[in-house]
Image (cartoon, grey):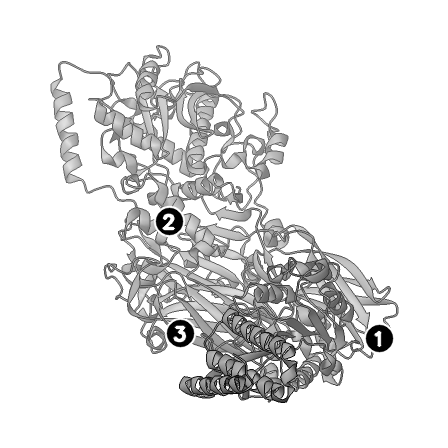
Amino acid sequence: MARAGFRLSLHRREVLGALAAAGAGILLPREAHAFGEEGAFNPRPLLTGKARWEGVRTTAPGHWSVELEGRTSAPAHRSPRPVRADEPVLLAEPFVLWGGDADLPPLTEREVSGLRRFIALGGIMLVDDFAPETGAFTRGAKRELARVIPEGAVIPIGAENVVFRSFYLMQRAVGRVEGPAQLQAIVRGGLPQVIFSAHDLCGALAEGEGGPSVAITPGGDRQRELAVRLCVNIAMYVLCSNYKDDQVHAPFLMRRRAPGDEGGSGKPAPRPPGRP
Amino acid sequence: MSERFALTGDLSTTVVVIACALAALSLGLLGAELWQRRKVAKRAVLLAVSGVVAVLGLLLAVLRPVAVTSRGHTMGPRVVVLTDVSRSMDLPGSGGTRRDAATRALEAMAGRSGVRFSVFGFGEGAPVPLSRGARDARDGEGTQGSRAPESGASGQGAAGKAGATPGAPGDARLDPRGGTGAQEDVPIGAAVAGVRPALRSDLGAALEATARAPDERPAAIVVISDGRLDRPTAAGAAAETRAALEPLSLASEAPGGGTGLPPVHTLAVATEGPPDASVRAVRAAGAAVAHQPVTLRVEVGCSGGLTCEGALPIAVRELREEGEPTLLASGESRVDGGQGTVELPITLDRAGTRILEVKLKAPDGDRLPENDTRYVAVDVARDRIRVLHVAGRPTYDVRALRMWLKSDASVDVVAFFILRTPTDKVKALSDELALIPFPVDELFNVHLPSFDAVVLQDFDAEPYGLTKHLPSLGRYVDRGGGLIMVGGPDAFVGGHYGRSAVARVLPVSLDIGEAQASDLASFTPRLTPAGQAAPVLKPLLDLIGPELPEMPGTSVVGEAMPGASVLLTHPERKTPRGAPMPVLALGEHGSGRTIALTVDGSHRLLFSAFAQSSAGRAHGAFWDALLGWLMRDPRFEPATIAPKGGCIAGEPTTLVLRTLGLGTGQAEGGERGDQGGPGNGAIGGAIEAVVTIKRLGSAAVVRTLRAKVREAGEVVELPAGVLEPGGYAATVEVVQAGAEEASAGGAAPGTLSKGPATRRDFACERGGEEWADSRPDPERLKAIADATGGKALLAADAEKLPLPEGTQVLAERQVSALAPPWVWTLMAAAALGLHWITRRRAGLA
């Protein structure tokens, strides 16, 4: 879990962990994507300040990729690496996942500059609040993003938005917690560029060897499944943009979408050769 | 020469008058005196004689008479003769062709003495003198199949053709011997016959040029024509003629308040046309836009006594690169009063210049079959570019391309991305999915022609049922469609396109032997010399410079196909023949164009640390140019080419080539030269433009022309020889000299030196617009003559033209004294002395 905020004192394990991570960063070769994986979805965790990517949710991005690859034709990176806001590698790919469970310290100027470049080039950011009960991280992220995108107003996006039909037809947002039915977003050029989730999507995705790492609230496999579907939709939105807004899809989607329809007819989906 | 006497050679008239008056007064006084002294009659006669002699002697001594010798000649009036040299003058006229009749009329006028004729041919634009230069140029074409551009005072050929040097009126003279001037010793008839027929009959422009010329004002203008003119129009012939000649108006000096214009006499070379049924005009109701129906209005006519009973069948077909033309529409026109009209709706799918054949089935007795078929070049515009974007799976590369396509308001994109494969487990019911069936059959069976371009991005043809549609995709390209294949694991060989109909149209071979379909190693593409120079990469290179971003591997392809141009290559990977493997190749196939981009990392131009320097604009610049080149956007063409002044079948045709982007002539991988940036500057190496002319339908190469090019923007005229009626495609390739030989010899780098090709379709007609209506129009000639007080006659009556009289011009004058002054003085003194003596003897004082 990425812990936002300064810590005046560091534990020994944290120091060792940081050193190990730094050493790994030196020893590991530069991340190289093979042909065909270059454009694969890569849910890179975004780190700011002194935050580190640790905790039970560290498996969430990898599991996100697994679910995406298993359910769709989209390629994905199984082991996404965290990226810092002030690193040039931030601009290597157009998606980052910024999560946390607490308020975060102000971004440095270098971080603001890096994120500003990321947004200016068209990058998409998912802000996932790991502790939506308090909402401290979301408030802090909005505050800092206001420095990055001063003109960006946060607005709610609901089932009418392409994010909710980029692969699955979804009526509402849901994550580890049920949360609000809508997501929020900073929309630029008619498309959500920063998506705020107050549902702890990473919590729903996180899995250990024995199964899910974080309990679902209020609970149930169905909620976890819907959270995974929302994550798949977000990934497909990142990869396809507003593809499902194209006119060619409209008659199909209008027939299928009905109020409260989440279960369908109960018939299993056929296996067509391929589905756009 | 003439000789006369004058009273004086140096005194003014006033002095002469005073002297004469004094002499007369003296004589009067003498007479009065003698009358008073009439008593001395015996001496009166002697006194009178001596007195008169004395007075005259004194007068002559004052005036001193001279002999004046002068030399001069009669200056004939300047008469400008405007002879129609348009294509319609080759139609039957009075006793042969109309051109023959014009020649005879000129020769008849040549017998008129005392008239200075300035003979011009009019067709298109300013008139041109019918000089020896024109005849020489035509002879050159006949023997060499080429026409040298004329220039200067002696080179006014190609009368009326676009781009011909406008003649300076007054250069050519028709002298009584039948020549065209003192320096011209050729019969005027030969000069007229030697002029290349013009595609228009613009008498209005000829009159305007004559009126504006800084030459001597013509005393009269003679027009020799069949009256089938573009200008003046039939309806406004009188007014338009007067307006054209307005600069010559002398209204203030005209007696009786006349127009003051020189009279325009007309000589009609024909009064009747041959029995003929023809397609007189083909007009489109509005601009032709791809995929949108447009109505062609076809006007037909029957004349010359030919009866067109019932309806005349008409068919409109589009000429194709290969094979039979495609029927677009057909109908029948009912002829009433010698003319008829039919409106035929057609839809053209491909933008650019399209050649239409409009064919009339003429009745028996038609003596002019050449105008039964018209070839019309239609410039088809695009309202929007319709692009079919098909991707095998969603990736950042797909996202980047889609976002660019959607951001361009001029692009109408229809996208289908495969989001789910047969092995994916969606864990949902079908109603929970926002997925639709991939309408592959509907797309490629029904809607394919409606797209301007198809983008296949990392798309495997086999599992999604595209394989069976690949032949129609190949035909789509043949008929003018654009195709881009973008790399990825499922593209090119990996996408099961090898040995398919699509492999035939791609600019790269998919024969890679035993090699893997993909190369996973990262690399940085390398610019070829052609890539450095190609206008299609100029926007990208202007943004990022010559260094491209690193690519994460590539689809493996084979050699560049013949005629393709390779702009980017792999730095290490080789084709089976040893050439650097193409990474970006452009090619023409049939009427369409194709692009092969073997990498899936062009999104790095949009989003990466590399892209930051150009704010991500490099991706848009790259794809805008690729799609623009595919759609033949002039911005990305390496050259322009067009027939000079149109093309007349059976007559020599000249193509005008203008190069826009040229290479540096450096070896592959070399740095761009200081002078040789893309599309500008001089060239370090030898550059050659190779123009290939293919006949539409058979795709047979009828000409291959070559020209050395020294700098971008240079205009080169290429003689294309004589072409038959039909449609043609002129393709220009800018290559480094010797590149083709190297390529033919197996040296792969030769293909690297060949830049992208550009193409222009054009049509050649036997008679064209000038033969569309074979009827002469003597009424129009009469209206022109009447408007200026001229006479309208037949060409056979040329000698009856009422031309103005000439004026005498003094060229030399010599004055010589009849006697020296002292002789006149002595004679006067002697006469006075004799008269004084006589008076004394008569007793007078």
- Horizontally, is B360 left or right of B527 in the view? right
**Whether label 1 touches label 2, CB < 8 Å:** no
Residue tagged 3: B707
* Percent x, y of residue A171: 53, 23
Q: CA distance from mark 1 to mark 2?
A: 67 Å
* Percent x, y of residue A175: 42, 21
Q: CA distance from mark 2 to mark 3?
A: 38 Å
**B629 up-or-down from A155: above or below:** below
Residue tagged 2: B600
Q: Which of pointers 1 and 2 indicates the residue nearer the eye?
A: 1
Tell me if I can see residue B745 in this picture: yes
Tell me if I can see residue B510 in this picture: no
Residue tagged 1: B306
Type of residue at label 2?
Asp
Type of residue at label 3?
Ala
Secondary structure state at the residue bearing disc 1: loop
Please tell me how crowded label 2 is: few (under 14), some (14-19), or many (20+) other residues with Cα within 10 Å: many
Q: Mark 2 vs mark 3: same chain?
A: yes
Q: Quadrant of residue B479?
A: bottom right
Please tell me how crowded label 1 is: few (under 14), some (14-19), or many (20+) other residues with Cα within 10 Å: some
**Whether label 2 touches label 3, CB < 8 Å:** no
Front one among B815 and B811 = B815
Secondary structure state at the residue bearing disc 2: loop
Q: Mark 1 vs mark 2: same chain?
A: yes
Q: Chain of mark 3?
A: B
**B384 up-or-down from B688: above or below:** above
Front one among B55 and A189 = B55
Type of residue at label 1?
Leu
Q: Quadrant of residue B87?
A: bottom right
